[in-house]
Amino acid sequence: MDQKKNLRELTLTRDEIQSLLSSDGGRLTAEEEKAIRMRHGCSLDERADIHWMGEGNAGLEEELRCMEASVIRRAQLAAEETVIPQDSREKDAIIQALKSGKKNR
């Protein structure tokens, strides 16, 4: 019971949590920070530097750069593809019947 008396309730806003996370100074692990951000809906600062995972390992750096280039290339190709609508006679017949007020049974 003594432990419960010493506890106090504290309510923080999303902005306050965001501020605390940005001034953390590395006290939280990456997984802990990610869990807190997901739990409270806090995003990363858009202007923050991206931590590059391959630093110090030339082979890993090259592999990650190749993967990044591949993903960017696929995204560009997907953006260029357009869907060409196909002619649908049945759909056109239904629309025409609806426009003319006829019921086709």
Image: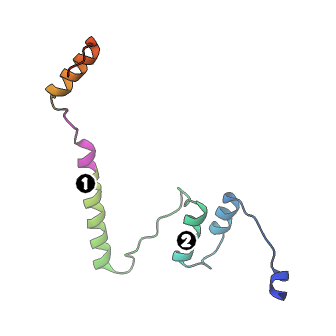
Going from N to C along the chain, the mark reached first, 2 or 1, is 2
The numbered disc on residue 73 is 1
Tell me if 73 is positioned left or right of 7 in this view.
left
Q: Which region is colored magenta?
A: 76-85
- The residue at the point 68 percent across, 67 percent down is 20
Residue at label 2?
A: 35
- The residue at the point 59 percent across, 78 percent down is 28
In the displayed structure, 29 sits above or below 85; it is below
Q: Amino acid at mark 1?
A: Arg
In the displayed structure, 34 sits above or below 1; it is above
Quarter holding the C terminus is top left
Q: 33 or 38: which is nearer to us?
A: 38
Tell me if 93 is positioned left or right of 21 in this view.
left
Q: Position of residue 84 (x, y in %)?
A: 19, 34
Numbered-mark total: 2
Residue neighbourhood size for the residue with mark 2, other residues' Cα within 10 Å, grouped as few (<14), some (14–19), many (≥20): few
